[in-house]
Amino acid sequence: MRPRRLSGFTYLGCHRYFLTICAFQRRRLFTSGDLVNDVWCEFVRTAEQQRFAVVAYCFMPDHLHVLAEGLASSSDLKVFVNIAKQRAAHAATRWIRGRLWQPGYFESVLRDDEDVHDVARYVAQNPVRAGLVRSANEYPFLGSAVLSRDQLVESTMWRPNLAPRKGAPCG
């Protein structure tokens, strides 16, 4: 069953989203650097084309977490995720047989008063909480398209140069 979307919300514009995209049948696919790199490249390419910034991501063995921000009034989350999943699935055929993704995805729309830095840290600490590593620095499959890895996993005080939320002009 596909997760439901928020009724009456368009998913267009300068919003921030925390996404969870699961591997088909929750298979442990994201354990190979080659596969993860190919999938990540397709997400980055699609994010740039669809006017999204990927603030943080983490490939867990059977799912992907993404913290994304729309950069323009035309940024459409549903289009971004659908295209990225399709492209990633095509790229993954070099490494796996069968389907890559479960249908749909789970999303949380961040409120203006939610601290994006806390959510990014949550994403980066996911493999630690899952017991895969002792430190996020040890985990190879996390990062950001707008922050250095050190900014994402080492500092508790970083403040990336992201657009302010309240009253921010939407490109």
Image (cartoon, rainbow, N blue to C red):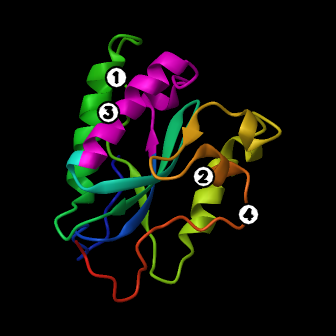
The residue at the point 59 percent across, 68 percent down is 159
At which x and y percent is residue 74? 16, 65
Where 17 falls versus 130 (above or below)? below
Q: Which span of residues is magenta-colored?
A: 21-48
Q: Residues within 10 Å of mark 3 (few under 14, many from 20)?
A: many
Viewer-side residue, 162 vs 114: 162
Residue on which disc 3 sits: 42
Q: What kind of residue is marked 2?
A: Val
Q: CA distance from mark 2 to mark 1?
A: 25 Å
The residue at the point 79 percent across, 41 percent down is 135
Q: Earlier in the sequence, mark 1 or mark 4?
A: 1
Residue 99 badge: 1
Side of 9 where 116 appears, left or right: right
At which x and y percent is residue 13? 24, 70
At which x and y percent is residue 72? 23, 67
Residue 156 badge: 4
Q: What kind of residue is marked 4?
A: Thr
Q: Closer to the observer: label 2 or label 4? A: 4
